[in-house]
Image: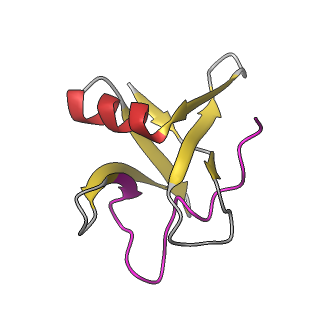
Amino acid sequence: MAHQVRCINKVDRDNPWERITHIGGVNDDNSRWRITQARAIEGIESGKWKFYVSVGGESVWIVVATSRFGNKYIKTESDGEDQNNLLSLPECPK
């Protein structure tokens, strides 16, 4: 099942190099969900979950990437240097 990510949390919201700590969204029953980035990575890599963001009415998949330092993180497939669909999402309620 695919889950739409509608919000994120970061330690330093305005720093583009700071890692996302949590992603979140809304369930079918309108309850909110929020999980850590590590748990999202684990779910994606195991095939348990798929996540996406909606960009201009289009669904864009979230994938696991590895930094040049060997750290895993999540990003959208269409992310480039000038656009980061995840980082443009609003802050998740805590």
Scheme of colours in the image: secondary structure
Quadrant in the picture for the C terminus: top right
From the viewer's perspective, is residue 20 above or below residue 48?
A: below
Write down the region rendered in magenta.
73-94
Q: Give the x, y percent position of residue 90.
A: 71, 55
**Apparent side of residue 43 relative to residue 53 in the rendered image (left or right):** left
Relative depth, front residue between 59 and 81: 81
From the viewer's perspective, is residue 19 above or below residue 8?
A: below
Q: Give the x, y percent position of residue 60.
A: 41, 55
How many discs mark residues in the rendered view?
Answer: 0
Q: Give the x, y percent position of residue 13.
A: 68, 63
Q: Main secondary structure of the magenta part?
A: loop
Q: Give the x, y percent position of residue 20.
A: 53, 53
Residue ID at (72%, 22%) = 30
Residue projecting furthest to the top: 29
Residue projecting furthest to the right: 93
Quadrant in the picture for the N terminus: top left
27 magenta-colored: no
Residue projecting furthest to the bottom: 82
**Apparent side of residue 4 relative to residue 74 in the rendered image (left or right):** right
Residue ID at (56%, 41%) = 22
Residue ID at (40%, 37%) = 38
Relative depth, front residue between 56 and 69: 69
**Apparent side of residue 16 relative to residue 47 in the rendered image (left or right):** right
